[in-house]
Image (cartoon, helix red, strand yellow):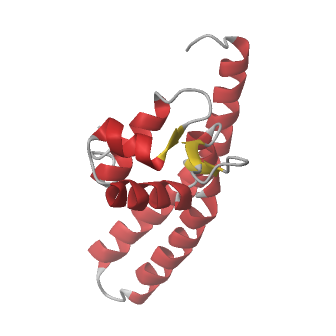
Amino acid sequence: MITAAGMPRMPARVLMALVAAPAGGYTAAELAERLEVSPAAVSGAVRYLQDAHFARRLPSAGRRRDRYDLVADSFHSVVIGNLPVYIRMADYVEKIAAATGDEPAAAERAAQMAGFLRFMAERMPQLVDEWIAQRDANPTGP
């Protein structure tokens, strides 16, 4: 399902394994064994998830192998972190709309896209606040 939302397959698999991870997460070797994939595949997936702020590396004092775990509240943190991207993208798309000249269909498409991106950038913080309030009011489930 996560690949349907746009995440590459291996990072999606590692993400779901981390959702089910015990306290303290998994080592890369444990992830590779659990998913029956190569350590190289896990390495690339973990790097992707770290870059996207979904996973974090937990150094293990006195051990050579780091552990990986989910970032707390990663999904709504990622959404909020991307809001400046939505605004910059809306600005850019509006410039495209202005440059279309005598192409009203292109200008309309660009205006719709920019409007949606600005709407999302405005509403997402409110939705995340609502989620946090709901989560805190009912910590055992939705």
Q: Residue at x 55, y 41 (%)?
A: 75
Q: Nearer the viewer, residue 125 or 22?
A: 22
Residue 57 in the image, given as x and y percentages of width and height: 61, 51
Q: Is residue 6 visible?
A: no
The residue positioned 46% from the left and 27% from the top of the image is 20
Given residues 65 and 36, the one toward you in this image is 65
Q: Nearer the viewer, residue 11 or 42?
A: 42
- Residue 141 spot, x, y in % from top left: 57, 12
Question: Between 35 and 136, which is closer to the camera in this rendering?
Answer: 35
In which quadrant is the N terminus drawn? top left
Among the 4 quarters of the image, the one containing residue 111: bottom left
Residue at the (40%, 62%) spot, across then down: 44
> Residue 115, position in %: x, y?
49, 60
**Is 25 located above or below residue 87 in the figure?**
above
Number of dots carrying numbers: 0
The structure residue drawn at horizontal position 67% and vertical position 38%, both measured from the top left corner, is 126
On screen, residue 41 versus residue 86, left or right, reads left
Residue 48 visible, this angle:
yes
Q: Is residue 20 left or right of residue 84?
A: left
Compared with 96, 142 (above or below) is above
Q: Tell me the quarter of the image containing the C terminus.
A: top right
Horizontal placement of 27 versus 38: left or right?
A: right
